[in-house]
Amino acid sequence: MGIGSAIVLNGEIFGGKHSWAGEIGHICVDPAGPKCGCGANVCLEQYAGQDALFRRAGMPIASTLDDLIDSFNAGVPTAVSAIDNAATTLGRAIADTLNIIDVDHVILGGNFVRLLPCFQQLLISEIKYGRMSGKWTETEVIADKNNDKAALLGACFDNSPIL
Ligand SMILES: [Zn+2]
């Protein structure tokens, strides 16, 4: 399961020239990282995507997010490390994105809504560290209240051309 985002500027979704804007999952977070499905070796998805989280936690791919969160809360080292790495790399990718588009609000959806209580402090710290204006501005990071419907709603509203 990958990681995507939507950039909303002045109340409008910014899709970019080819409607691919917001591919945050393929931002470089570790040049020495594992190979990604996109062909690069550097991507956020290899740290914070669902399959990567389970793999890094030493859990079967068929595990559930509840299994991972339970292991994290129980202090299982591999689960703690996997979620901490996800927070750090996601924060790094968000900071880089904010440095480019200069907005103050980040809304997390999907699995990150449920992971936010596990990694909020580390995530915010990484964003503040990596954001150029982090010393002078506050970045609000909240969970999407439509968590379980975000992908469905996005697909319904998608007006990009069918390839
Ligand atoms: Zn990639």
Image: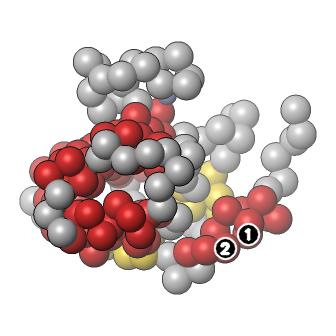
Q: Circle 2 sits on which residue?
A: 149
Residue that appears at 14% across and 52% down: 77
- Please tell me whether mark 2 or mark 1 is closer to you in this view: 2
User: Residue 140 placed where, x, y %?
Assistant: 31, 73
Residue toward you, 82 or 158:
82
Tell me the distance, in whole angstroms, between the alpha carbons under discs 2 and 1. Answer: 6 Å
Q: Is residue 24 visible?
A: no
Percent of width and height locating residue 22: 55, 45
Asked if the residue at tag 1 contacts the one at tag 2, i.e. Cβ–Cβ closer than 8 Å, the answer is: yes
- Secondary element at image label 2: helix
Q: Quadrant of the C terminus?
A: top right
Give the residue at mark 1: 153
Residue 54: image location, x then y, percent: 39, 47
State the residue in front, 79 or 147.
Answer: 79
Q: Is residue 70 left or right of residue 135?
A: right
Dot 1 surroundings within 10 Å: few (below 14), some, or many (20 or more)?
Answer: few
Asked if residue 93 is positioned above or below residue 153 in the image, the reply reads above
Secondary structure under tag 1 reads helix
Q: Position of residue 147 (x, y in %)?
A: 56, 75
- Quarter of the rendering containing residue 123: bottom left
Determine whether 33 is above or below 68 in the image: above
- Identify the residue shown where x is 84% and y is 54%: 159
Q: Label 2 is placed on what type of residue?
A: Lys
